[in-house]
Image: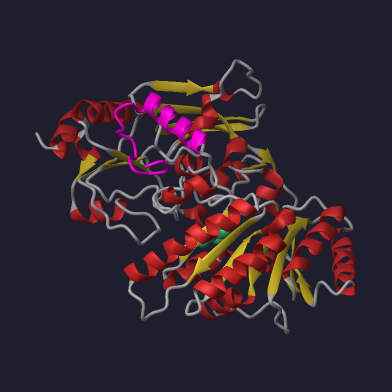
Amino acid sequence: MKIPELLAAALPQDCVTTEAWALQSYGCDRTTIWPAQAVAVVRPRHIDEVQRCVQLANEHGFALVPSGGRTGLSGGAVASNGEVVLSLERMNRIVDFDPVDASVRVEAGVVTAQLQDYARDKGLYYPVDFAAAGSSQIGGNIATNAGGIKVIRYGMTRDRVRGLSVVTGKGERLELNRGLLKNNTGYDFRHLFVGSEGTLGVICEANLALAPAPADPLVLVLGVPRFADVLEVLASFRQRFSLSAFECFSDNGLRKVCAAHQLAPPLSTPAAYYALIEVDECDGAAEQAVAAFEYCVDQGWVSDGVISQSLGQAAELWKLREYLSETLAAWTPYKNDISVAVSRLPAFLVEADALMAARYPDCEVVWYGHIGDGNLHLNILKPERWSKDDFLSRCSAVTDELGDLLVRHGGSISAEHGVGLLKRDYLHYTRSPAEIELMRGMKALFDPRGVLNPGKLIG
Ligand code: MLT
Ligand code: ZN
């Protein structure tokens, strides 16, 4: 029997499809590098159907690509090698909510924004947030340890996960950490699955910690002529506030966003860089923010600025940052999602800028990032006249040089997008041979036949 027939015989019939549109659309994520070449798409409704699928893969030796909202930027959910896509999208129930524990149990296919809305309705807050929240799913967020714009205050997805229900690559069901806040009973497997990119098991359900509802946001956008001064601005605001976001973007990115979305630039005089700062609106916050802004102007760090006067204005200012990724997609950018310690950012960026200018004299480089977390997104835009393959091979060569630079600055080749296929060959710039060997050992333990997401993360 062929693989789709095997699956159709073992699962409810409407779970399996081989329609061309489905193979194409479920076979790729937001990278446009690898062609979709899935042989089937399976969309189970229950964890026991997921388990059956993994058991079949083991029995018959085919590969599965666990799949969420496919908003990834590293090729972690691409099926380009005859795999079966295992989509969790139908497992999208909010299973339980406990106001005393301030936690929620959800299936993997719940969309991030759906959970955010649910938490808000309960008077609480799910703080993992990013531009793709309307499509990304919780299972994928956990599998990639998604970060986003609120990490500076709330941490990454890992910091929300209190428990997981997974089916391992071997086909075993594990209930990890049972939603407990305290559980000192040895190895915490839950954390192994966070960020494992579907290589150890399929995340089916999660118990997630919610946060208290935050105050309304007060947002500032400040023009900063020199990058090193962005960090002075960060330090000044940090002394006065518990920040909920501190983002930065360069002027060329801002201009593209404004042009694509017919938005007015935030400041009358452009600056080389912009800091977007979010704090809680509370008594005296606006006065404090203006005082911090004036201090930064007096120091010569900031040239101009704007502060939101309403929730609507705060949301408008956020668009300038949140629309960047989608706007740049028109240039099929090569993405470097890197991190160094915040204090090392200026020195790192001087060298990174020099490297980009030397290696990509013909390419425009747009960067933005979660500067408060030391996370930069360096996007290299493809010149129209270059073929995709030519562009990719040039980018790959420079990623090695960037890797060397990151080693010298103690940084990471993937801060929040994950490794997938895109950064797999660069993993050794951040992880030692001993660590990679241990990763392989773990893979062999949880997925001895290598049926889950082969080729991703560690190859
Ligand atoms: C962002 O910060 O906007 C996201 O990580 C997406 C991206 O880098 O393109
Ligand atoms: Zn980001």
Tell me if residue 355 comes above or below residue 104 in the rendering.
below
Q: Residue 100 in the image: x percent, y percent?
A: 67, 27
Q: Is residue 436 covered in magenta?
A: yes
In-image side of 401 versus 267 (left or right): left
x 30%, y 35%: residue: 44
Q: In this orientation, which residue lies closer to the viewer: 94 or 381?
A: 381
Q: Residue most toward the top? A: 185
Q: Estimate the x, y position of residue 135 in percent, counting from the top left.
A: 45, 53
For residue 317, above or below residue 237: below
Q: Is residue 13 left or right of residue 64?
A: left
Rendered residue at 50%/28% (across/down): 164
Up the image or down, 405 lies above or below 302; here it is above
Return the residue nearer the eye: 155 or 134. 155
Query: Which region is colored magenta?
Result: 433-459
Q: Does the magenta stretch include residue 415?
A: no
User: Where residue 194 appears, x then y in whole percent?
Assistant: 51, 36
The residue nearer to you, when weighing 311 against 411, is 411
Quick one: quadrant of the C terminus? top left
